[in-house]
């Protein structure tokens, strides 16, 4: 009988630590949500016991909440697009036509081209240019000042007077407020989605281990995993 070397003994004693890749968790959030809902449904009618840290009913609610959060975040995100597009259109209109207001002031104030009155009209200096503030909320406020100043300086009857700027000011204020609220809602929805994702992955990972422990036969194990939605080839 040949002597046993230390290396051979170590090789014999060492367990196989290579992880079993029967099932994994999807990286895609949509695929994860689909898996969570499917696993929760299968678990409800399965003889597989609940986990110590989460009941079957609690996980069903958890999976449904995560799936719903994806739809909420997407819907809120989509809602910002039309408003953002319209605000950009109004920004171009404002940039194009503010020069006429500057022209009215320049005609009446030769000494400085009317720059002394710019602040009253909501016009500020940003970099090398005099314009309405770039920030949306500040620009909405500046448009209100512009309309009031046009009337106060009797430019309201001009082609680019109050009648021209008032509808722009009104719409811009509404859109700027709505856009800010939607961005806040979108941020909140995305935050909720991200908060729900990690716990969902924890339960799904534990569920895989529970299935493997309760169904040691590989063929049976594989069938149960597939029944719960753990089909790695799909995601």
Image: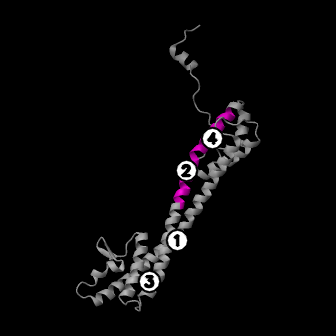
Identified at 66% across, 38% down, the residue is: 207
Between the C-alphas of marks 2 and 1, the distance is 25 Å
Local SS, label 2: helix
Instruction: Find out whether the residues at labels 1 and 3 contact each other: C-beta distance under 8 Å.
Output: no
Q: Which residues are magenta?
A: 185-212
Between 1 and 96, the one lying in front of the other is 96
Local SS, label 3: helix
Nearer the N terminus, badge 3 or badge 2? 3
Question: What kind of colouring is applied to the model shown?
Answer: one colour
Horizontal and vertical percent position of residue 7: 51, 17
Between the C-alphas of marks 3 and 2, the distance is 43 Å
- The residue to which callout 4 is attached is 203
Between 79 and 30, the one lying in front of the other is 79
Instruction: Farthest residue to the top: give it.
Output: 1
- The residue to which callout 2 is attached is 194
Identified at 29% across, 90% down, the residue is: 108
- The residue to which callout 3 is attached is 165
Instruction: Farthest residue to the front: give it.
Output: 152
What is the chief secondary structure element of the magenta stretch? helix
Label of residue 83 in the image: 1
């Amino acid at each position: 009988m040949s002597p046993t070397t230390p290396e051979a003994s170590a090789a014999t004693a060492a367990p196989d630590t290579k992880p079993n890749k029967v099932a994994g968790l999807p990286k895609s959030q949509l695929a994860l949500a689909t898996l969570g809902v499917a696993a929760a449904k299968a678990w409800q009618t399965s003889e597989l016991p609940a986990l110590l840290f989460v009941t079957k009913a609690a996980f069903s609610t958890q999976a449904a909440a995560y799936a719903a959060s994806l739809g909420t975040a997407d819907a809120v995100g989509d809602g910002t697009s039309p408003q953002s597009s319209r605000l950009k259109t109004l920004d171009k209109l404002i940039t194009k036509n503010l020069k006429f207001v500057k022209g009215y002031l320049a005609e009446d104030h030769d000494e400085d081209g009317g720059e002394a009155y710019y602040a009253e009209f909501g016009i500020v200096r940003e970099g090398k240019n005099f314009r309405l503030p770039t920030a949306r909320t500040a620009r909405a406020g500046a448009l209100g000042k512009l309309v009031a100043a046009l009337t106060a300086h009797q430019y309201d009857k001009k082609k680019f007077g109050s009648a021209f700027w008032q509808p722009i000011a009104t719409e811009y204020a509404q859109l700027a407020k709505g856009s800010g609220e939607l961005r806040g809602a979108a941020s909140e929805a995305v935050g909720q989605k991200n908060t729900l994702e990690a716990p969902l992955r924890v339960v799904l990972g534990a569920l895989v281990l529970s299935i493997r422990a309760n169904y040691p036969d590989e063929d049976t194990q594989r069938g149960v995993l597939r029944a719960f939605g753990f089909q790695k080839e799909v995601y």
